[in-house]
Image (spheres, rainbow, N blue to C red):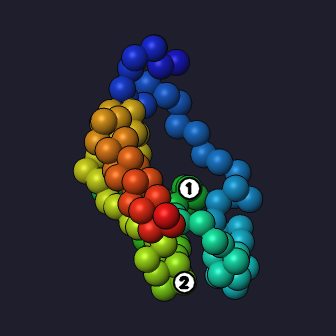
Amino acid sequence: MRSAGSSSCKEEPQRWPQPENSFDFLSRELYAHSIRKLQAHVLFIKAVHGYFDVRRESYYSKESLSFMIHTLKSTLKERFQFVEVPGNHCVHMSEPQHVASIISSFLQHKHMLTA
């Protein structure tokens, strides 16, 4: 267990979600259809050394992630922002101020676009 105030997830046991909770459980067509219906602004923060896929056998494959990002960019256009940050999957815990500043900037910019 992680102690209060710990900023690393190294102590956490490795958890692999069920396949049905991963992106690959959806067909690409259903994913694209869902994104076309999306009206929200989307911020996608990805750690450089983070996961590309939750499935153990395709852990380092960038194919699903690339498809997701391309679909979001091409469909949402200015309503989509992708930010890659240095760090691993737990960058939100190890560098919370950095991640918070990205989120804050996104929310302020989004507010200016809709005002």
Upstream in sequence: badge 1 or badge 2: 1
Residue 86 coordinates in the image, percent (x, y): 25, 50
Residue on which disc 2 sits:
75
Disc on res. 112: none
**Secondary structure type for disc 1:** loop
Question: Extreme left residue here?
Answer: 86
Q: Residues within 10 Å of mark 1 (few under 14, many from 20)?
A: some
Quadrant location of residue 29? bottom right
Q: Residue at x 45, y 14 (%)?
A: 4
Residue 100 coordinates in the image, percent (x, y): 37, 41
Camera-nearest label, 1 or 2: 2
Vertical position of residue 1 compared to residue 34: above or below: above
Residue 88 coordinates in the image, percent (x, y): 34, 46
Quadrant location of residue 22? bottom right
Q: Residue at x 36, y 26 (%)?
A: 7
Res 39 visible = yes
**Secondary structure type for disc 2:** helix
Amino acid identity at mark 1: Val
Vertical position of residue 105 compared to residue 12: above or below: below
